[in-house]
Image: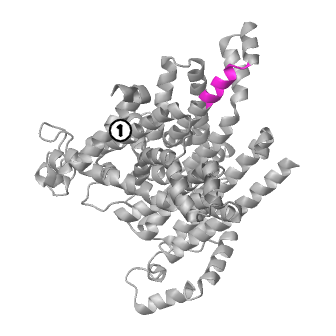
Amino acid sequence: MKKLVQRLGWPGTVALIIILVFVLVALLAPWIAPYPLQGAGGPNVAAKLSPPSADYWLGTDHLGRDILSRIVYGTRVSLTNGMLIVAFSLLIGLPIGLAAGYFGGWIDEALMRGTDVFLAFPALLLAVLMAAALGPGFLNSVIAVAVTWWPWYARLARAEVLVLRGQPYVEAAQLSGVSHWRIILRHILPATGRPLTVQAALDVGPALLTAAALSFLGLGVLPPTADWGQMVDAGRKFFPARWWYSAMPGLTIFAIALAFSVLGDALRDRKGGTGRASA
Amino acid sequence: MELLRYILRRTFLSAFVLVGVTFLVFVVAQVVPSDPAALYAGPRPTAEQIEKARQELNLDAPLPARFATFAGAMASADFGISYKSRRLIAEDLRAYLPATLELAIFSTGLALLIGIPFGVIAAARQGGWADRLCSFGSIAAVAMPTFFLAMILQLIFAQWLGILPLSGRLSREIAISAPLPMVTGFNLIDALIAGRLEAFGDALTHLILPALTLASYPAGVAMRLTRSAMIEILERRHIVAARALGLSEPRILFGHALPNAMGPALTVIGLSFAYALTGAVLIEIIFAWPGLGRYVSEAILAKDFPVIAAVTMVVTICYVVMNLLIDITQALVDPRVALS
């Protein structure tokens, strides 16, 4: 614990703990939620739109479902959403960046100019276009965001490879006739691992923020599955008279995004890397 | 010479990117949706109607030919007609684009106006409470979901305090009873041209909340960039000399240090403009702002792909051109950029 505080500072440590708590909540949702059935979508019309009380700590929605339980269940959607976006983006961006950096020349030029096209789009708009074409749904919204996200990993991976390519051990492997793909997979990929893993873990925050924006627009998970962005949107009809409906999930999104952002800041202060823009 | 080569190369790359963007929009809007002809034919079409739509849309032509038609139409700003309203999309855009641009430009100005002074203060008080507060503010601004911030601002300024309008671009009295003549499409400018100060004031108050919402994220970035640039400059010799001469602190900060730290401002203008253009999709729904964002979100619900494609193209062109202009300006201001 003391070592952690030393490395991240107090704000970074608190942020890390908050993120871990969210992960725990997601894993244990059915046991933590006060009303698991409502969290999973079961209606409870008798208590619709009740304000926060001892029975319903954060109030209820227009179907009487406990907002706290919905938020707890929504944690699963949001976190998996964020992680899948990052994973899909790595799956596309990493091979492209590795190949571009390793082979150089026209392969590099072709791959990176293609990447530029994707970067030229305002990210959210491309995601909206993709999501609209694919139709609403969890996996479609993941793909829609990943399409706008992968170019960053391609660039990051390429930059890492450019440094590694000139290393003596890589040259030694090349001279002893090891195949290119084997060098990339066994000798370069593991070395790029650390900076990429850190960046990828931190990107889960901005990724789930973008996913929340999509589901706010009605392009994410379909009801009755609980989702934060969709809850904020659904509560808009009752805002501000029944403020809790939108405010509670909205604050939750803010809290988790803030935790990722503070943690990223704490890590950057130690390493001196650069941030990135997101929608 | 290096500068000219850099400018030419950047311009060429931007043109290439625009071709790529057109291709991508074509694929997503014309190839991915299951059956554009069924959408075009309207609700519950008969087989004949679909077949007719298929011919009208030229869907039986080979893909390269269809792409050529599409790219040609985009290049001549012929965006076709909306599946839903059957109106000319280009005409709709003429009304909606200025509304979004007005919002984007105004919010970019706000972002600089908020971000830069706070960045200067944070740098001047490095490590102090003011610095920490500013830093936290900038992190919070990045993490805040835009759509949620919009609702909070509406709650505070429109519902509780009642000092700013909740939504819309003009009050009903002006929009319906005495509409502004559309010259540029920018309400602020049109009101001035018509010499109507009350309409100018009305348009301005309607702009503040949506612009503030869109400005929060770029203001946070502007603050950070200004802060780090200022910290570096405050250690330079001419500042030490100015201190030794006994110049007042504000004069040193704003007169001698800040002009040297203006490089980041350009970056922020580009970023903020881009952010406003995309953020508009979310913000314009919440503030009932009659711009591109609201237009496209209605098109999404109706699966009106020509509209979605047209808006994506127009916004992306604005975005690419803006980035090009900023890169060129940056190279002109600081020729070292062209060499790297």
The front one of A276 and B332 is: A276
Give the percent coordinates (x, y) of residue A228: 32, 50
B120 inside magenta stretch: no
- Which quadrant of the figure has residue A217? bottom left
Position of A190 with respect to A59 (left or right) is right
Q: Quadrant of the C terminus of chain B?
A: top right
Residue at the far front: name it: A176
Q: Assign a secondary structure to mark 1.
A: helix
Q: Is residue A229 visible?
A: yes
Q: Is residue A44 left or right of residue A12?
A: left
Q: Which residue is painted at 78% across and 40% down in the image? A: B336
Residue located 46% across and 70% down the image? A133
Q: Is residue B162 left or right of residue A124?
A: left
| Residue found 40% across the figure and 65% down from its top | A140
Write down the residue under mark 1: A255
Does any portion of residue A240 appear in the rendered image?
no
Residue A80 percent location from the top left of the image:
34, 54
The boundaries of the magenta stretch are B226-236
Q: Tell me the subunit letter for badge 1.
A: A
Q: Position of residue B127 (x, y in %)?
A: 52, 19
Residue placed furthest toward the bottom: B48
In percent of width and height, residue A242 lies at: 25, 43
| Residue type pointed to by label 1 | Ala
